[in-house]
Image (spheres, grey):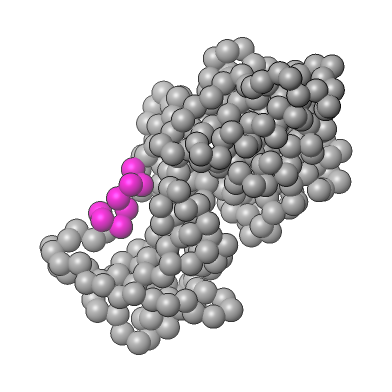
Amino acid sequence: MADCWTIRAEVSREVARAALLAHEDAVDWPDDWVLTGMEVADDRPDDWFVEVYLAHEPSASDRKRVAALFHGGSPAFRVSRLENEDWVTLSQAGLEPIKAGPFRVRTPEFPKEPGTLDFVIPASQAFGTGHHATTAGCLAMLAEMKRRGTLVRNVADIGTGTGLLAFAALALWPRALATASDIDPVCTAVVEANAVANSVTLGSRQGEVTMVVADGMADPLLQARGPYDLLIANILAGPLEELAPDFRRSVIPGGSLLLAGLLTTQEGAVRSAYLRAGFRLAGRLVNGDWSILWLRRRRNYSLQRSSASL
């Protein structure tokens, strides 16, 4: 195989997201360049890398083209040579289809697999593609909820990213109302494109997904469509703790709350916050260093009560 060169930058999650989406709109991007982006490590969810693979040593103009993806200033790049590698295969390593319960999540390069709930999400949308342990864990937990007889008529996916978890919930409960939200406005176009690719209807009726831009539950439409009998939040531990009172108001008594984005070392603090908010543990899954929690809102529970334990 020919030598491969890479241009790599380590940036924040937000900067990486913006660069990956800018790449989607780059009409002059060379067909033989491969762009990837994901977390630097599982225990560093806010630290990402963006990396370009190409078959020649990058010129100044090549670096300038990559830098153009980063609006507001180019990050520091590290250029490396990888000898005798099948670099296209290497760039896609770890992006093989993911299976979680009945779900299979793949990039467009892979075909559908009969007998699965199949979703196609482009690899450049690495936030929420299913390849991260938290997203895959949420898919598995949704399947477990369905297996245990949970009924869902109204679901919200907070911090939706690609829309995948909202789509998955509708696949399991096809008559539900579904609302997807994210604090980042760029996710609207991502969700819309992925809905088309996966034959998911956008709209406000049963079996359709409504997309809103919101910080947590702070959106009139998100509030008006509640309360929910299933609320999904795959975000970060800090915001999860802060949102506990809002989520209690947004979930019906006896309803389900699926939380992810927290490390196992952060689980105790998150569970304590939701105990105080009136939730109990219904199910728990650990995927790598990450905890996925299924909570149920207690009925007739006082916020002052603290003697029970999750």
Q: Main secondary structure of the magenta part?
A: loop
Residue 228 lies left or right of residue 264; in this view the side is: right
**Residue 126 sits above or below residue 67 on the image:** above
* Relative image position of residue 267 (x, y in whole percent): 56, 35
Looking at the picture, tell me which residue is in the foreground, 242 or 305. 305
* Relative image position of residue 287 (x, y in whole percent): 43, 33
Looking at the picture, tell me which residue is in the foreground, 153 or 205. 153
* Relative image position of residue 17 (x, y in whole percent): 54, 61
Looking at the picture, tell me which residue is in the foreground, 11 or 102. 11
- Please give the name of the residue rendered at 37% of the width and 69% of the height, measured from the top-left corner: 8
Q: Is residue 72 magenta?
A: no
- Please give the name of the residue rendered at 37% of the width and 86% of the height, measured from the top-left corner: 61
User: Image quarter for residue 251?
Assistant: top right
Q: How many marks?
A: 0
* Relative image position of residue 269 (x, y in whole percent): 62, 37
- Please give the name of the residue rendered at 30% of the width and 50% of the height, measured from the top-left corner: 93
Query: For the magenta stretch, what is the residue range?
Result: 89-96
- Please give the name of the residue rendered at 41% of the width and 70% of the height, measured from the top-left corner: 9
**Residue 54 sits above or below residue 255 on the image:** below
User: Image quarter for residue 65?
Assistant: bottom left
Outermost residue toward the front?
307
Whether residue 279 is visible: yes
Quadrant of the drawing holding the N terminus: bottom left
